[in-house]
Amino acid sequence: MSDRWQYLIVLGLCLAITAPLEVFGKGVYRQAGRAARALLPVAAIFLVWDAVAIAARVWTYNDKYLAGIEIPLHIPIEEVLFFLVIPLCGLLTYNAVSTILDWSKRR
Protein backbone atom coordinates (compact mmCIF):
# COMPACT_ATOMS: atom_id res chain seq x y z
CA MET A 1 0.00 0.00 0.00
CA SER A 2 1.25 3.44 -0.86
CA ASP A 3 1.88 5.71 2.13
CA ARG A 4 0.23 8.55 0.19
CA TRP A 5 -3.21 7.16 0.92
CA GLN A 6 -2.85 6.38 4.64
CA TYR A 7 -4.44 9.59 5.91
CA LEU A 8 -7.44 9.20 3.58
CA ILE A 9 -7.77 5.50 4.42
CA VAL A 10 -7.84 6.26 8.16
CA LEU A 11 -10.54 8.90 7.62
CA GLY A 12 -12.54 6.43 5.53
CA LEU A 13 -12.22 3.79 8.23
CA CYS A 14 -13.41 6.26 10.86
CA LEU A 15 -16.54 6.86 8.77
CA ALA A 16 -17.05 3.16 8.11
CA ILE A 17 -16.70 2.21 11.78
CA THR A 18 -19.15 4.85 12.99
CA ALA A 19 -21.66 4.57 10.10
CA PRO A 20 -23.71 1.81 11.80
CA LEU A 21 -24.37 4.23 14.69
CA GLU A 22 -26.77 6.06 12.37
CA VAL A 23 -29.49 3.54 13.30
CA PHE A 24 -29.75 4.96 16.82
CA GLY A 25 -32.13 7.81 17.51
CA LYS A 26 -32.91 10.49 14.96
CA GLY A 27 -29.58 9.92 13.27
CA VAL A 28 -26.98 12.37 12.07
CA TYR A 29 -27.00 11.73 8.33
CA ARG A 30 -30.81 11.94 8.36
CA GLN A 31 -30.44 15.48 9.70
CA ALA A 32 -27.82 16.66 7.22
CA GLY A 33 -28.71 20.34 7.50
CA ARG A 34 -28.37 20.27 11.27
CA ALA A 35 -25.06 18.42 11.03
CA ALA A 36 -23.76 20.92 8.47
CA ARG A 37 -24.70 23.85 10.71
CA ALA A 38 -22.77 22.22 13.54
CA LEU A 39 -19.69 21.20 11.54
CA LEU A 40 -19.06 23.82 8.86
CA PRO A 41 -18.52 26.95 10.99
CA VAL A 42 -16.04 25.17 13.24
CA ALA A 43 -14.26 23.56 10.27
CA ALA A 44 -13.97 26.99 8.62
CA ILE A 45 -12.35 28.48 11.73
CA PHE A 46 -9.82 25.65 11.96
CA LEU A 47 -9.05 25.85 8.23
CA VAL A 48 -8.26 29.56 8.59
CA TRP A 49 -6.12 28.71 11.61
CA ASP A 50 -4.29 26.05 9.57
CA ALA A 51 -3.76 28.45 6.66
CA VAL A 52 -2.19 31.03 8.98
CA ALA A 53 0.02 28.41 10.63
CA ILE A 54 1.12 27.00 7.26
CA ALA A 55 1.91 30.48 5.90
CA ALA A 56 3.93 31.26 9.04
CA ARG A 57 5.74 27.91 8.70
CA VAL A 58 4.57 26.91 12.18
CA TRP A 59 2.65 23.93 10.84
CA THR A 60 3.69 21.55 8.08
CA TYR A 61 2.61 18.24 6.60
CA ASN A 62 4.68 15.28 5.52
CA ASP A 63 4.07 14.98 1.76
CA LYS A 64 4.85 11.26 2.01
CA TYR A 65 1.42 10.71 3.60
CA LEU A 66 -0.64 13.09 1.45
CA ALA A 67 -2.44 12.49 -1.84
CA GLY A 68 -1.08 15.75 -3.23
CA ILE A 69 -4.41 17.53 -3.60
CA GLU A 70 -4.60 20.95 -1.99
CA ILE A 71 -7.23 23.64 -1.62
CA PRO A 72 -6.15 27.28 -1.81
CA LEU A 73 -3.61 28.46 0.78
CA HIS A 74 -1.75 25.11 0.54
CA ILE A 75 -4.10 23.17 2.79
CA PRO A 76 -4.08 19.43 1.97
CA ILE A 77 -7.46 17.89 1.17
CA GLU A 78 -6.85 15.42 3.98
CA GLU A 79 -6.86 18.27 6.49
CA VAL A 80 -10.14 19.60 5.13
CA LEU A 81 -11.67 16.15 5.39
CA PHE A 82 -10.24 15.70 8.89
CA PHE A 83 -12.14 18.77 10.10
CA LEU A 84 -15.36 17.28 8.70
CA VAL A 85 -14.96 13.54 9.24
CA ILE A 86 -13.74 13.43 12.84
CA PRO A 87 -16.43 15.77 14.21
CA LEU A 88 -19.03 13.87 12.17
CA CYS A 89 -17.87 10.62 13.77
CA GLY A 90 -18.09 12.37 17.14
CA LEU A 91 -21.67 13.44 16.41
CA LEU A 92 -22.59 9.90 15.38
CA THR A 93 -21.10 8.51 18.58
CA TYR A 94 -22.72 11.16 20.78
CA ASN A 95 -26.10 10.61 19.16
CA ALA A 96 -25.88 6.83 19.62
CA VAL A 97 -24.72 7.00 23.25
CA SER A 98 -27.38 9.60 24.12
CA THR A 99 -30.09 7.45 22.56
CA ILE A 100 -28.94 4.30 24.34
CA LEU A 101 -28.76 6.12 27.68
CA ASP A 102 -32.28 7.49 27.13
CA TRP A 103 -33.53 3.97 26.38
CA SER A 104 -31.90 2.62 29.55
CA LYS A 105 -33.51 5.36 31.70
CA ARG A 106 -36.98 4.40 30.44
CA ARG A 107 -36.65 0.82 31.67
Image (cartoon, rainbow, N blue to C red):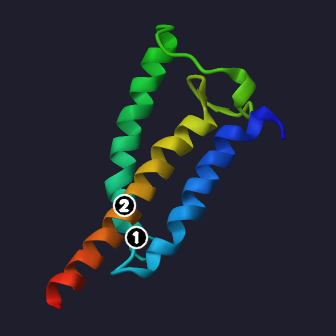
Q: CA distance from mark 2 to mark 1?
A: 7 Å
Give the camera-side residue of 20 and 66.
20
Please identify the residue farthest to the right as the structure is shown: 1
| Residue at (56% x, 59% y) in the render | 15
Q: Percent position (x, y) of residue 98?
A: 26, 71
Is 30 situated above or below 46? below
Other residues around mark 1 within 10 Å, as few (<14) / some (14–19) / many (≥20): many
Is 20 situated above or below 86? below
Give the camera-side residue of 32 and 16.
16
Horizontal arrangement in the rendering, residue 13 relative to residue 101 (left or right): right
Q: Percent position (x, y) of residue 31?
A: 38, 73
Is the residue under label 1 in contact with that under label 2 (CB below 8 Å)? yes
Type of amino acid at the residue the image marks with label 2: Leu
| Residue at (38% x, 80% y) in the render | 24
Name the secondary structure under disc 2: helix
Type of amino acid at the residue the image marks with label 1: Val
Upstream in sequence: badge 2 or badge 1 = 1
Residue 86: numbered disc: none
| Residue at (35% x, 72% y) in the render | 96
Name the secondary structure under disc 1: loop
Residue picked out by circle 2: 91
- Quarter of the C terminus within the rendering: bottom left
